[in-house]
Amino acid sequence: MSDRKPYEKPTIIRIESSMSKAGVPTPKQRVRQTIGGVKVDELVERFGSPLFVFDEADIRRRYRRAFDAFSSRYPNVQFGWSYKTNYLKAVCAVFHSEGAIAEVVSEFEYEKARELGIEGRDIIFNGPYKPYDALLRAAKEEAKIHIDTFDEINDLERVADELGRQIPVAIRLNMDTGIYPQWSRFGFNIESGQAMDAVKRIKAGGKLVLTGLHAHIGTFMLDANAYKVETAKMVQLMNAIEEQVGFTIDYIDVGGGFASKNHLRGIYQPPEVVVPSIDDYAEAITSALYENIKGSSYPKLYLETGRHLIDEAGYLITSVVASKTLPDSRRSYIVDAGVNLLYTYFWYKFNIELAREVGGISEPAMINGPLCMNIDVIDESILLPRLRRGDKLIISPVGAYNVTQWMQFIRYRPRVLMVMADGSVEIIREQEDLSDIERREILPDRLKLG
């Protein structure tokens, strides 16, 4: 019997480097020393680690750029800030101060918008589940209610009876835009005739008045043409409704889903290549409006853009707390932020930057979070120079969905900061402590110790 070891295919790892003036290879490093003009080291020194940080000036720039892309092409445009993307009060307030209304998908988000001072008429109320009491409040306050099911039509007719008046409503649509998987679980399908059936059902009831059409065809959409197909089908349905049923459609809401410059897993080209520009999305949507609208009446165009406006304005600073060598010879760097804070890790490969230049050759490494779970991996394959305890990493873009989908699991959730447009720094969410975790808990007397 042979003592030879079984053959193992060699692994070749490409290590990128640049040449120094002396001709000696030096690591090609990504370094970010400031956020919004404030030094990363200063932020950690003042507020600790980990930290989420948002850049107010960048948020405003992104909003204005998106609004200009649409308003320069179409005469009547309104953005609705998507609360589920990031519902921190300071973030929402920035968007509202820029002119965005609120787009919400639950009574919880609706209450947040109202607490911020947003009037009901400036709230778009979406979502597949709206409890009766939430519908009643939204109708009383004249919010834009987007119906998702026939059951919701029935509920709103009860609300109309209770209020003693007709209620303006919109319906959510789904359709084939050439994108797979098709988001068919929300709203009423156009191709099957279900959408027109819903319109006729609303008309027959006589208690609701259809004034708008809404659709949201997906998330992180990399095909701008899908929006052209979506918008064309919505306008064609609008034309048919006005001609056949007699409702006048005041607005069309094409939803959101515009991609940020994040790196979607499974896509091997860089975001700069595959992600459409905001002008690409705007041109697709507005050209479909002009090509399909009949007559001289142009409905108001609503957009529910979230990720595209906030993702790249958000950062997570984390620090190395330990390191070790793995059996495959890679370095494992344990940092103080994990997948409990970065829920979107499972879809995106983040940009990871160092807060300082580090000497030495870059080597294969893994970045692990602090959780006692094997899946707590921030990056499973990255080239890094040899880091020390206390070295800081900056992870981005993380502004979308992470601070709404983060988990209170094993570790307290950290402070969130906003670097203001004037260069000052504000805490916009304080770090948690035990009182936050236990505030709703009840310990029965019979289980108390001592």
Image (cartoon, helix red, strand yellow):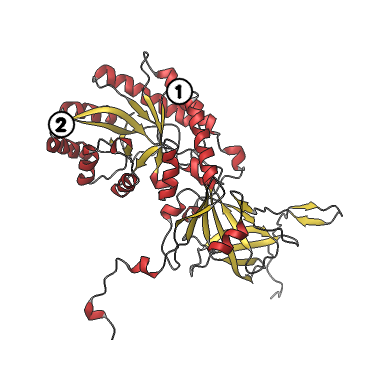
Give me the disc on residue 253.
none
Q: Position of residue 280 (x, y in %)?
A: 53, 30
Work out whether 328 lies above or below 29: below
Which tag, 1 or 2, sits closer to the chain's start? 1
Camera-side residue of 144 and 406: 144
Q: Amino acid at mark 1?
A: Tyr
| Residue at left offset 61%, top offset 38% | 273
- Image coordinates of residue 389 in percent, x first then y, are 63, 69
> Decide: marks 1, 2 in contact (CB < 8 A)?
no
Query: Dot 2 lies on which element?
Result: loop
Q: Secondary structure at mark 1?
A: loop
Per the image, the residue denoted by label 1 is 74
Q: Where residue 183 sits: x, y (%)? A: 38, 39
- In this rendering, would 368 be left or right of 131? right
Using the image as rendered, state which of residue 334 and residue 7 is in the foreground.
334
Tell me which amino acid carries mark 2.
Arg
Vertical relation: 207 (above or below) 129? above
Q: In what quadrant of the picture does the C terminus appear?
A: bottom left
Mark 1 is surrounded, within 10 Å at the Cα level, by few (under 14), some (14 to 19) or many (20 or more) other residues, namely: some
**Residue occupied by mark 2:** 165
What residue sits 45% from the left and 23% below the top? Answer: 74
Which of the pair 108/122 is nearer the observer?
122
Residue 291 x, y percent position in the rendering: 44, 18
**Residue at 57% from the left image edge and 49% from the top image edge:** 423
Q: Is residue 193 visible?
A: no
Q: Is 238 placed above or below 361 here?
A: above
